[in-house]
Amino acid sequence: MALFLGIDGGGTGCRAVLADPAGRILGQGSGGPANINTDIDLAAASIMAATTEALAQSRIGVAPADLTAALGLAGGSMRAAAARLEAMLPFARMRIVNDGITAARGALGPDDGILAAMGTGSVFAVQRGGTLRQVGGRGFLMGDEGSGAVLGRNLLALALRAADGFHPMSPLLAQILEEFDGIEGIIAFGNTARPGDFARLAPRIVTSDDPAARAIFDAALAELDASIGALQQGDRLPVVLTGGLGPHYAARLADRWPLRPAVGDSVSGALAMALQMGEAP
């Protein structure tokens, strides 16, 4: 029996869902970070851990080499990284795309709309007349505006500026400096930290009344609002905000844009793409 696998992987973790040709879910699994722009080897290990768990849950007794897989991964638009990962994975057939594509496929379904996926990283997509276009998602160093990783990085940067006297100290900034053992500790952390490590600081920004946290979040909101406006091109397309930070942004942007809930998520979008691969001749 042909089996189909959808994988959603980002900077914090990955998920796998296994289904039969009718789309009936047979098993699910999870694994560690799967951002192929930052660590391909770790991504491959995480993908296989999630796949192994899904297969074990299904109790069907098939191997990964029997599967048709669609993988929506952070960094999936990087062709060289995607080609290297494909050579490392055992699936019979596979398609690797950026996780923004699978997130949009899951969230928007067939309808026109805009997706803003705001998690450890960030990526946007706009769909008009059945044509789906991804924008943004350029990675932690060059983009991912409004993402958890960028919010966390900005918090640490502001703490450094406050310690140097360039910015007013706040209770949260003082707390961060104490937790990281001061300026040198923050610098040492930044030298080795991955996007997911920075993103773990984001909840302390979006849920805080601290003036420094509000300033960081307000700036991110303004940037997100401008990005959605650019994608609208004068229209009023419905907007779907997903990811761990999506609800926090939605609460502040509900009076600006016509928001609606997602039809599905990135892993369901990946599974839909895998099933579509099975329909192709």
Image (cartoon, rainbow, N blue to C red):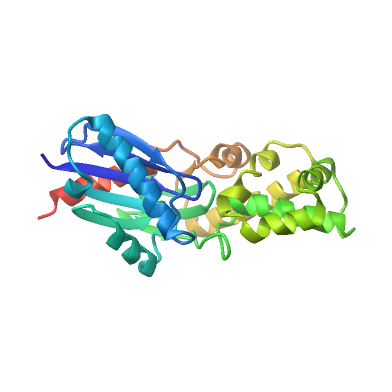
- On the picture, is 55 further left or further right than 138? left
Identify the image quadrant of the N terminus.
Answer: top left
* Quarter of image, res 26: top left
Q: Residue at x 49, y 49 (%)?
A: 116
User: Is residue 80 something one can see in this rendering?
Assistant: yes
The front one of 56 and 92 is 56
* In the image, farthest residue toward the right: 165
User: How many numbered marks have been drawn onto this rendered protein structure?
Assistant: 0
Q: Position of residue 11 (x, y in %)?
A: 50, 50
Residue 145 or residue 43, whichever sits in front:
43
Q: Residue 71 in the image: x percent, y percent?
A: 32, 51
Question: Is residue 73 visible in the rendered structure shown here?
Answer: no
The quarter of the picture where residue 142 lies is: bottom right
Q: Where is residue 14 shown, x and y percent of the image?
A: 41, 44
139 and 198: which is toward the camera = 198
Extreme-bottom residue of the structure = 80
Q: Quadrant of the C terminus?
A: bottom left
For this rendering, which residue is in front, 54 or 278?
54
